[in-house]
Image: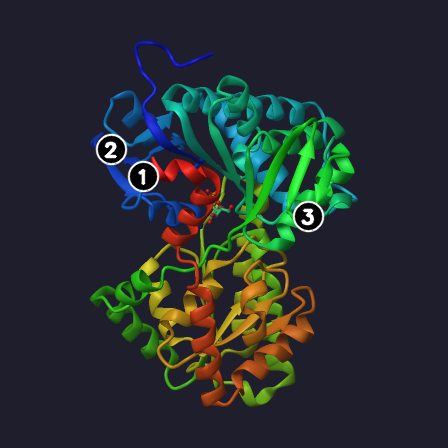
Amino acid sequence: VNASPSTPPQARVLLASNRGPISFTVEDDGTLTPRRGGGGLVSGLSAIGDEIESVWVCAALTEGDRAATRQGKLGDPSVRMLDIDAGTFARAYNGIANSTLWFVHHLIYNTPTTPVFGSSFRREWASYEAYNRAFAEALAEAAAPGATVLVQDYHLSLTPRLLRELRPDLRIGHFSHTPWAPPDYYRLLPDDIARDVLVGILGADQAGFLTRRWASAFADCCEAVLGAEVDRSALTVTHEGRTTRLGVHPLGADGDFLRERAHRPDVDSRLAALREAVGDRRTIVRVDRTELSKNIVRGLHAYRHLLHTRPEWLDRVVHIAFAYPSRHDLPEYREYTASVLRVAQEINDEFGTPDWQPVLLAVDDDFARSLAAYRLADVALVNPIRDGMNLVAKELPVVSDDGCALVLSREAGAYEELGEDAVTVNPYDVIATAEALHTALTMPAAERADRCKRLAEAGTALPPSAWFLEQYRALAGDQLQE
Ligand code: F6P
């Protein structure tokens, strides 16, 4: 199916992602308020607007988005929002993307009881296929001949192949913002689906990853599941006569933006409030989505262990934990949020005094307050059980006022670049994490400042616009001269 004659293909560069750069809320009086889309992927991609003229195809996520799409009120001609049937969208996004593929790549299943791939799963899978097809059709319609299309993430793993079938003339890239599962774990998926996801991505000319480790795991899965031919030095995968290049592009923090944003008055006022609450105590700061893979509960257990085993820290440290709401349509996430709240409360009940609250936990979204906590941090705690990159680990050292020490999980993608200057931990080992917190808290100020400087340099080596251009150049190549 080629684009219809009434809507001539025009865009030379297209992006596709589930979450777009803008989202709408319906107010009580029926008006639509636009807000910038959230999350690391959107921050990364938003940076390209000024560099390259492009069209961004995304899904309508909220009722406000659907209304704005239907009423033609997106207000930005470069954004195309797909108004996919709400049930189909929910089954694709919640059922497959966030409960199946996310769980597989982050090793989240408790395998004696989950996953269960039965008939409701198959219904969700059919919706995921339909959702990916809707993207492929929209892209096929909007792309100029020979255009470059950059498809993002696990929501859209089938789109590259479907798009290639519709438009073999396009240059197609896919980028995974998650880790990739090792073959034994990946093969929990039903065989046909394990194949379809890989073949879907291999429909691209280039498949990008945040680290070499995730790119290798993808190649391992292609070899184990498809019998594909993998060239590990050239980083290519060949399957059924087509070769896909693997790219490694480690997204970094936007240093210029963060330094400027972190010194605006709204951040200053929140910093003053936090200082007031903390007093002259030391701080351990974490900022995450309330996300199963972020390991917030074990982080709290480690902090409790620290207070038990190192009583010198009683009344001398505060753990600031900001955990934004995320994916609350899924029961696992609601339960996880409840356990974060419960364990934080237990610690405050056990150790707190009238003058000292050991854990300051907030579960609402406030970017300015997060930046204030970044500035105040003596220690940053980033201990995911698995994470594609983790931008907090890269952002916090950039903004820290006095130089912070970073306690970092070796399972975060950021470990590849930051591991040397961080205090690194096995995220499952709460005793080792407690010891790492102690090491970080007692690190001499000069060493902490030196390490923090190097962390900030490494963490901003490939800021979002450069990150995007790097993968775009790798894909578009000689087209850039045209
Ligand atoms: O791939 C990870 C990611 O897309 C991040 O970039 C982002 O922070 C997160 O997932 C957002 O998830 P969601 O769109 O479901 O809120």
Residue at 40%, 57% (x, y): give it: 463
Q: Residue at horizontal 40%, vertical 28%?
A: 147
Q: Which mark is residue 76?
A: 2
Residue 428 shown left or right of residue 224 in the figure: left
The secondary structure type at the circle numbered 2 is loop
Residue 474 place in picture, x, y as percent = 48, 44
Quarter of the image for residue 442 reads: bottom right
Using the image, tell me which numbered label, if any, was put on residue 208.
Answer: none
Q: CA distance from mark 1 to mark 2?
A: 9 Å
* Contact between labelled residues 2 and 1, with CB atoms less than 8 Å apart: yes
Front position among marks 3 and 1: 3
Q: Within 8 Å: ligand 1 and the Cβ of disc 1? A: no
Q: Secondary structure at mark 3?
A: helix
Three-letter code, disc 3: Ala
Q: Tell me which amino acid carries mark 2.
A: Asp
| Corner quadrant of residue 241 | top right
Residue 194 percent location from the top left of the image: 70, 33
Residue placed under numbered mark 3 in the picture: 217
| Colour pattern of the rendering | rainbow
Question: Which of disc 2 and disc 3 is earlier in sequence?
Answer: 2
As helix, strand or loop, the secondary structure at mark 1 comes to strand
The picture places residue 366, in percent across and down from the top left corner, at 34, 57
Q: Which residue is mark 1?
A: 22
Disc 2 residue crowd, few under 14, some 14–19, many 20+, Cα 10 Å: few
Residue at image x 69%, y 31%? 239
Q: Is the residue 126 above or below the residue 283 in the image?
A: above
**In the depicted structure, whether residue 390 falls above or below residue 157:** below
Give the number of the mark in front: 3 or 2: 3
